[in-house]
Image: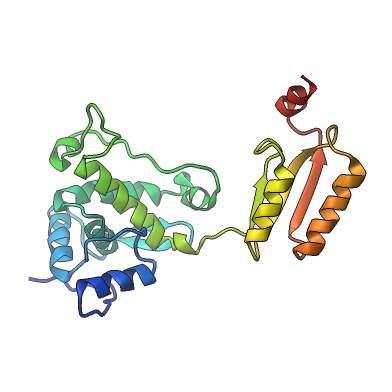
Amino acid sequence: MQPDLQSSRIKGATEAEHQDELYRLKATDGLPVILPTEDRVAEMLEMAAMAGFDPDLILGEVGRKLGEATVEKVAINSVMAGRKPEHLPVVISAVTALCDPSMESIEFQVTTHQIAPMLIINGPAVQEAGVACGFGALGYGHRANLTIGRAVRLCLWRLAAGWKTGLWNLWIDDGMSSDPMVLAVRILAGTERLQVALGVANIYLRDPTMTVGAQYGLNEQWGGRFLLEMGISHPFIVEGNRT
């Protein structure tokens, strides 16, 4: 018997049209997905039922928008990621863990740092889901590893409305390039609303008059979107330039 699915449907005459519509709705990670047909989702939910999870069970809320992660929604994203039904309990456990407030999922969803959640799987689930745990486990060619990770990322992306996160400001470290002021100019020229800040600019290596003049000019050119902080900067920059 088909489960009574609560999620919305999309319309399309062909698979290509469905793919395009999912992409337009930002329901993918940018790559083609397995279409989550009712039969495929039902097969996934059958495995969830065997593991004791009802389709409407709420696992928690996912930051940034604190969207509800139900078993049904996790199953749909799992189908789209190319996962097999036996992988679903692992994804459900992972999403449940990410919904824990101590995980601070809002913070790692919006930060500009290069971070991502890492799943460490042990116990019987390793064998049951076929998770690779030997040589090259972090490489390519392992379906369970790659699709479980992709399913979790899709859940974070879709259920938390991660695609709506965006950036409203960008801080450039004084050590990010040989001349961070030039980098700031390039970013300002290529954006319309992004606020760009340089911090902390080294007061020992910059002429005060020219630096303030540059800040004034950039703000005049790009609508006050440039911020400048000056200070003693970082030891490695000061000492590096002294040598």
**Residue 6 visible:** no
Q: Position of residue 234 (x, y in %)?
A: 73, 30
**Which colour scheme appears in the figure?**
rainbow
Image quadrant where one finds the N terminus? bottom left
Q: Position of residue 141 (x, y in %)?
A: 21, 40
Tell me which residue sits at (71%, 53%) in the image: 185
- Check the image and report above or below for 121 versus 219: above
**Residue 170 visible:** yes
Query: How many numbered marks have been drawn onto this rendered protein structure?
Result: 0
Tell me which residue sits at (26%, 39%) in the image: 140
Between 94 and 10, the one lying in front of the other is 10
Q: In this view, does 125 lie to the left or right of 228?
A: left
Q: Is residue 157 left or right of residue 41?
A: right
Tell me which residue sits at (76%, 65%) in the image: 223
Between 8 and 14, the one lying in front of the other is 14
Image quadrant where one finds the C terminus? top right
Q: Is residue 236 left or right of residue 72?
A: right
Between 154 and 219, the one lying in front of the other is 219
Q: Where is residue 235 in the image (x, y as percent from the top left)?
A: 74, 26
Q: Position of residue 209 (x, y in %)?
A: 92, 45
**The quarter of the displayed image where residue 129 is located:** top left
Residue reaching furthest to the top = 243
**The quarter of the displayed image where residue 193 is located:** bottom right
**The quarter of the displayed image where residue 179 is located:** top right
